[in-house]
Image: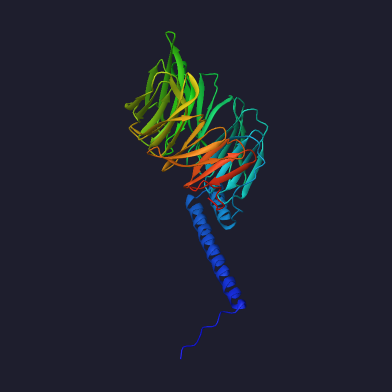
Amino acid sequence: MDQQQSPRPAGRVSRLSEIRRRRKRRHQLTVAAAMLVVALILAGVAGVYGSAMVGLGDVLDSIQIWLQPGPGFPVHTGMRQTVSVQPVNGGFALLGTQDLQVYSDSGRQLRSIQHSYARPGLAAGGNHLCLYSRGGYELRVESRSQTLYTTSLTGSILLCEMSSNDSLAVLTTSTRGTAELLVYDARFRQIYGWQMTESEGDPLALAFAPDNRQLAVGAIRTQDGRLVSQVHLLDTGSDYVTATYEATGSLLLALEWLDNSRLLAVFDGFSAVLSAKGEELARLDYAPGEEPADVSVCGRTTALLLREGTVDENHRLMILNDSLTALADFTLYGAQQVVCGRTAAYCMDSGSVYSYDYSGNLNWEYTASTAPQAMLVRGGKFLLCTAEKAELLSEGNEADPESA
């Protein structure tokens, strides 16, 4: 005769849960130890103990972030005004008017750095961040756990940009020309330098290619009373400018690499995709009276937000492929910023955020309790920064309690 199965004693269930937790913890420690051993071997192969310590520190930071998850979202930052939000491996960084905060993807605060810069700037790489003073002379290179380098330059800082392998490009004023470009590796050793002359213009944009080697520098100058925008293409392995693209009568607004061989240049009257040799591969002319309000690139897809010059509140969102063919093209009201993700574009206005797929269909909308200030798409998750708070939004139009 069949016997009825009795329920498991509560004590046994508790012991089984404890065993599972211990096994998971042992697995985590085993993986962490293996990662550390690999890092030490790589440091030994490098042959220079001191110079390998930066890379080892980055590995240890990653292990610590993985082993110590945070409480999740929303995160109460206490930052009243978010100037910029940038991704960093394992998390993200928020730049405010008085401080820089670094968080893990699970919502744990990793760093809080005070600054006194009147015009702070932030450039993010893979593991490192550059906090700098626009128009000032000081910059700081930070990892996710410590300050790596602090320096004062001889020229005032115009722009900084970091590559995914933590190389740092710095544009400063120069007494020998209109500007000077300096490139440092992840250990802050100078690996490249370029003096810009009057014929090469005054710089206003800077972008690293995904290969961490090619650079694009945008500049403007005047010729015969007319404005000329230039895009200079550089390679840190070459002493010469690779190519230069010129647009007479147009103002360059932004540069974004689509891949290692194609660069998106956004001007006030048109956008163009340029080859690494400076050739115009594709071009999109705006309608009369339109001008760019914001642009965002994800892979080879571009989200371009255009403003109608005669009506401040009317905007046009175009989602473009790498040949500047429109995947979607529609009118928005009151949009202020756009961020492009892998499968959707996100726009924010003074009170809400909207998600659109690449065909222009509305996925969801979210009304924030306070005015949105900055947005970031990371790992398929959407991060929204408002006054004193950062939260994740899910496809269901709700704040997402899970970690990124």
Give residue 246's quadrant in the image: top left
x and y, in percent, of residue 61 in the image: 57, 51
In depth, the one of 312 and 379 nearer the eye is 312
x and y, in percent, of residue 275 in the image: 34, 30
Query: Would residue 313 appear left or right of 152 to someone viewing this image?
Result: left
x and y, in percent, of residue 196 in the image: 47, 21
At x 55% / y 55%, what residue is drawn?
66
Determine the residue located farthest toward the top in the rendered image: 224
At x 51% / y 85%, what residue is drawn?
4
Whether residue 124 is visible here, answered yes or no, is no
In depth, the one of 300 and 59 nearer the eye is 300
In depth, the one of 298 and 99 nearer the eye is 298
Residue 265, compared with residue 250, is above or below; it is below
Residue 265, compared with residue 34, is above or below; it is above
x and y, in percent, of residue 156 in the image: 59, 24
In depth, the one of 335 and 374 nearer the eye is 335
At x 55% / y 19%, what residue is drawn?
175
Q: How many dots with numbers?
A: 0
